[in-house]
């Protein structure tokens, strides 16, 4: 596995399965109350340029459970927020801490941090992708179904960071992946190019076509962080892309629903469908903790 976790495009299928295996073991140890201080004495710097509940709390708690320490750094209060180059920040932090997790806008910023820093860098969400979330989603799918064999995952909605990572992660895990997004809101061209070279990918505009026979249905907000001003325009563009009873009736019997959260009930998902699938959705949220601990152990243990 590479030094960093920047995007799922960089990982092999074996890397992904190994992370999930480690995450399963760490989850079992946590549930059994077995201490697992694999990162004793290590520090993770967490840089946030965007808001977060799950990512911040799961990384910070995860690091504590691994015997290490996490530093919350708001980009606004760092010199990076006043224009200090990311290349310099990378070289300074590399001399203090053992790993960096960053949530920001531009994927290039994360790639630069990794390029100039000598320590592992973990992408905690960019406009391009959300690899930690999708690793947790894959962990949840495998827990529910036992394996990825013969499964179809369907993503409905904005071709955003979640769509990009789900397409890559789902295909690399061996699932069939369908995506339904309106014109003008399709996934990133680099992701579509990757998917075109893989078996089992289908891109639709019609969510009813995409969801047929799906075992896993996933959606996400119609307006991501940084797109707050486009909310009204987007709400119009995504009419018909709601995950609700009518749409779920077309999925496979026993299909699960995943949502990275935060969810906007009445928009991308109805309250009824959300609550009917709350067990899966909150297991998915919990799995962020286990999967990120696995990523940190694999990248930072040395
Ligand atoms: N799903 C997710 O990344 O949640 P936060 O924005 O709360 O970190
Ligand atoms: N697509 C959403 C995911 C939030 C976890 C966003 O980027 O805001």
Image: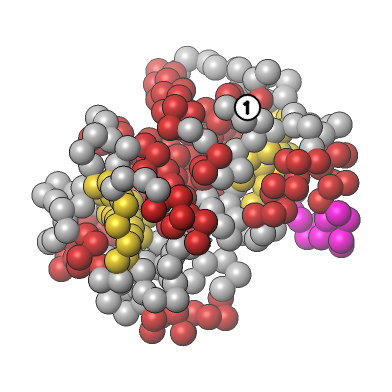
* Residue 267 lies in quadrant: bottom left
Q: Nearer the viewer, residue 82 or 68?
A: 82
Region of the chain picked out in magenta, as a range: 74-85
Q: Is residue 183 above or below residue 69?
A: below
Q: Position of residue 282 (x, y in %)?
A: 36, 46
Q: Is the C-beta of the residue carrying label 1 under 8 Å from the nearest atom of ligand 1?
A: no
Q: Is residue 32 visible?
A: yes
Q: How many marks?
A: 1
Disc 1 marks which residue? 299
Q: Position of residue 20 (x, y in %)?
A: 42, 29
Q: Mark 1, residues whose alpha carbon is within 10 Å: few (<14), some, or many (≥20)?
A: many
* Residue at x 61% of width, y 17% of height: 38
* Residue at x 15% of width, y 53% of height: 213
* Residue at x 65% of width, y 54% of height: 107
Residue 171 shown left or right of residue 289 in the figure = left
* Residue at x 40% of width, y 18% of height: 32
Q: Nearer the viewer, residue 161 or 284?
A: 161
Residue 201 shown left or right of residue 209 in the figure = right
Magenta-colored stretch includes residue 81: yes
Q: Is residue 34 above or below residue 222?
A: above
């Amino acid at each position: 596995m590479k030094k960093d976790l920047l995007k799922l495009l960089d990982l092999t299928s074996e890397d992904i399965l190994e992370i999930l295996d480690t995450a399963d073991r760490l989850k079992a140890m946590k549930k059994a109350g077995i201490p697992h201080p694999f990162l004793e004495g290590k520090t993770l710097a967490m840089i946030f340029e965007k808001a977060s509940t799950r990512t911040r709390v799961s990384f910070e708690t995860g690091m504590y459970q691994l015997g290490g320490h996490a530093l919350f750094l708001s980009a606004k209060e760092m010199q990076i927020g006043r224009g200090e180059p990311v290349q310099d920040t990378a070289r300074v932090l590399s001399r203090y801490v053992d790993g960096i997790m960053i949530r920001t806008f531009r994927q290039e910023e994360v790639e630069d941090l990794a390029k100039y820093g000598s320590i592992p860098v973990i992408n905690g969400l960019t406009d391009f992708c959300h690899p930690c979330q999708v690793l947790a989603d894959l962990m949840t799918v495998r827990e529910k179904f036992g394996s990825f064999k013969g499964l179809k995952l369907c993503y409905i909605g904005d071709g955003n960071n979640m769509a990009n990572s789900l397409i890559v992660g789902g295909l690399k895990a061996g699932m069939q992946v369908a995506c339904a997004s309106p014109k003008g809101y399709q996934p990133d061209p680099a992701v579509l190019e990757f998917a075109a070279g893989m078996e089992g990918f289908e891109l639709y505009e019609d969510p009813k076509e995409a969801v047929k026979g799906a075992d896993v249905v996933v959606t996400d907000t119609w307006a991501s962080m940084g797109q707050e001003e486009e909310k009204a325009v987007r709400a119009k563009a995504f009419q018909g892309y709601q995950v609700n009873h009518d749409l779920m009736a077309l999925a496979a019997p026993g299909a699960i629903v995943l949502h990275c959260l935060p969810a906007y009930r009445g928009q991308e998902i109805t309250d009824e469908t959300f609550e009917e699938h709350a067990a899966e959705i909150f297991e998915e949220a919990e799995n962020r903790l286990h999967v990120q601990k696995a990523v940190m152990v694999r990248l930072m243990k040395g």
